[in-house]
């Protein structure tokens, strides 16, 4: 029964995503925040389907810590579900994304028109500086920059060395940096078709002190994610 439920959810996920991506290509990209509004609508539809078909619910906490102005969310990443979650929890998220995602049909070309921030993971210091500048512009526009310091989806219970992009943002963007932990991988693992029913906990933690060194920042995030 669960594979059938997962199939129904995935049908809604992909069908709604394709239709809204087409709308963005034809109309939404020419409207202020049009692509972002479409992405948020897609996320709400998808989470509704996830709850109805797969019996997965989202239980956030700590959202009161997120400032109304721009900020940086350093989010733990266990599942594709994390994208849907942050699209609905934050009013105007701007995700840092790897440039390879531009190649995804329909969806990929809409990332930058939607205000998302590309980073070439093989581009060295130049790529980091461009990412920081993109994040500065997003924060100045009152958006919440979401970065996944692990760099990819990591199975629940697995520890991964954190990438230094979050250090560049913490040092280069004048905005609070709030860690966020999750157990989404318990319900929807990396590249997993079948979904497991139950709650997904998402916790926003207090801002990280700006005075931390690179090593202290990464150690602090590691403790929040894995301990």
Image (cartoon, helix red, strand yellow):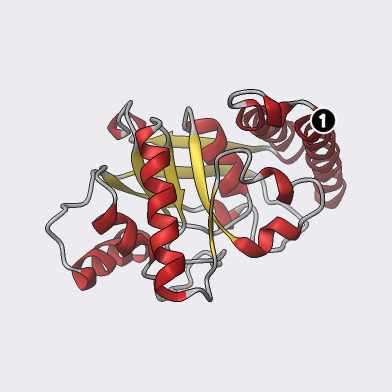
Left or right: where does residue 189 sit relative to residue 172? right
Closer to the camera, 38 or 61?
A: 38
Q: Position of residue 37 (x, y in %)?
A: 63, 26
Name above or below for residue 205 compared with residue 48.
below
Closer to the camera, 137 or 49?
A: 137
Closer to the camera, 32 or 154?
A: 32
Q: Position of residue 223 (x, y in %)?
A: 28, 64
Q: Residues within 10 Å of mark 1 (few under 14, many from 20)?
A: few
Q: How many marks?
A: 1
At 39% across and 72% down in the image, what residue appears? 125
Residue lying furthest top: 31
Left or right: where does residue 125 sit relative to residue 49? left
At 29% across and 49% down in the image, what residue appears? 173
Q: Which residue is mark 1?
A: 26
Q: Position of residue 150 (x, y in %)?
A: 46, 66
Disc 1 is placed on an element classified as helix
At 33% across and 26% down in the image, what residue appears? 68
């Amino acid at each position: 029964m669960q594979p059938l439920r997962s199939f129904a959810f995935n049908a809604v996920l992909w069908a709604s995503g394709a239709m809204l991506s087409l709308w963005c290509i034809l109309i939404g990209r020419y409207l202020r925040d049009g692509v972002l509004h479409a992405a948020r609508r897609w996320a709400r539809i998808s989470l509704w389907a996830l709850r109805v078909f797969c019996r997965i619910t989202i239980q956030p906490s700590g959202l009161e810590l997120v400032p109304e102005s721009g900020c940086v969310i350093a989010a733990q990443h266990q599942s594709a579900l994390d994208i849907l979650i942050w699209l609905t929890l934050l009013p105007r998220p701007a995700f840092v994304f790897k440039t390879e995602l531009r190649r995804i049909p329909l969806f990929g070309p809409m990332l930058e028109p939607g205000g998302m921030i590309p980073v070439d993971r093989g581009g060295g210091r130049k790529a980091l500086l461009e990412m920081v500048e993109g994040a500065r512009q997003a924060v100045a526009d009152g958006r919440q920059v979401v970065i996944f310091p692990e760099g990819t989806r990591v199975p629940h219970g697995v520890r991964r060395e954190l990438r230094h992009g979050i250090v560049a943002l913490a040092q280069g963007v004048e905005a609070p940096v709030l860690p966020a932990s999750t157990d989404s991988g318990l319900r929807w693992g990396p590249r997993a078709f079948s979904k497991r029913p139950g709650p997904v906990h998402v916790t926003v933690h207090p801002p990280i002190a700006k005075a931390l060194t690179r090593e202290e920042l990464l150690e602090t995030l590691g403790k929040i994610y894995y301990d």
